Image (cartoon, rainbow, N blue to C red):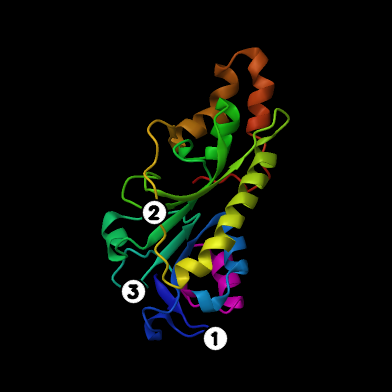
């Protein structure tokens, strides 16, 4: 069931709509973001994971625990998405006007879709983090700012993931106060080209790839797939 949890910072439904932004979170970076964000900057944390809900409440955040596409959800004037596991529908995105952004674990236009860190390492494409406007098209919105991360020959998926998450954390720390205060940063269209990979493609490489790649590439594939438990970032 979707519900708003009252915390020391108050219920979202009782707060002024302009106070702070909605922070949509999931995964390891989302957990870090909840801990790093001052409650005064966040009107409500939106999440589905019980552990994240508990962390947010402990930090003094108001929490919307459930699917934000329901009628029970009342949006703030702006939103920042950090690892949220649901694809936001066009109707919900439209409720924010042009004031919703996503923190993506790829150096767009490279790494659209699922597991951008794995694909950067496996395909030898650029890696990094991108803050971009969230649009109905997946990871296709105009770019606000990026941080490129070097891809090293010795990298495992986990090592590169750690550096990409650090870069994403820098963008989060820089932009959360500004977006919460009502800033509407300039953004540039994404360049042509880049890459996109679906969840099915990643799962195939994870589960069947060792049977499909040449023998000499199997060790490299294993390194690219070596992540700490629960640290594969899907978006």
Q: Helix, strand, or loop for circle 2?
A: strand
Q: Quadrant of the N terminus?
A: bottom left
Dot 3 or dot 2: first in sequence order is 3
Dot placed on the residue nearer the N-terminal end, 1 or 3: 1
Which residue in the structure is indicated by mark 1? 8
Q: CA distance from mark 2 to mark 1?
A: 31 Å
First in sequence: mark 2 vs mark 1: 1
- In the picture, measured across the screen, residue 215 lies left or right of residue 48, that is right
Specify the quadrant of the image occupied by residue 173: bottom right
Residue 216 in view of the camera: yes
Q: Are dots 3 and 2 in contact, CB under 8 Å?
A: no
In the displayed structure, would residue 56 be above or below residue 174? below
- Name which residue lies at 31% across and 67% down: 70
Q: Which residue is mark 2?
A: 133
Q: Which residue matches tag 3?
A: 74
Membership of 44 in magenta stretch: yes
Range of the magenta residues?
42-64
The answer to whether residue 46 shows anywhere in this view is no
Q: Is 152 situated left or right of 181 in this image?
A: right
């Amino acid at each position: 069931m979707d519900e708003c949890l009252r915390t020391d910072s108050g219920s979202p439904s009782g707060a002024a709509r302009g106070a702070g932004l909605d922070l949509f979170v999931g995964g390891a970076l989302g957990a870090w973001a909840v801990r790093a964000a001052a409650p005064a900057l966040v009107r409500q944390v939106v999440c589905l994971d019980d552990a994240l809900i508990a962390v947010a409440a402990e930090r003094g955040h108001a929490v919307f625990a459930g699917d934000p596409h329901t009628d029970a959800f009342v949006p703030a004037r702006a939103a920042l998405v950090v690892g949220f596991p649901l694809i936001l529908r066009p109707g919900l995105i439209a409720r924010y006007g042009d004031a919703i952004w996503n923190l993506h674990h790829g150096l767009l236009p490279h790494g659209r879709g699922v597991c951008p860190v794995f694909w950067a390492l496996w395909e030898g494409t650029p890696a990094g983090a991108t803050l971009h406007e969230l649009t109905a098209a997946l990871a296709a919105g105009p770019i606000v700012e990026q941080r490129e991360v070097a891809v090293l020959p010795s990298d495992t998926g986990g090592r590169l993931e750690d550096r990409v998450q650090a870069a994403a954390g820098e963008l989060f720390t820089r932009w959360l106060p500004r977006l919460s205060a009502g800033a509407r940063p300039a953004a540039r269209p994404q360049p042509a080209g880049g890459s996109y990979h679906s969840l099915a493609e990643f799962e195939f490489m994870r589960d069947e790839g060792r049977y499909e790649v040449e023998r000499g590439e199997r060790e490299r594939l294993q390194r690219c797939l070596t992540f700490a438990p629960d640290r594969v970032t899907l978006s």
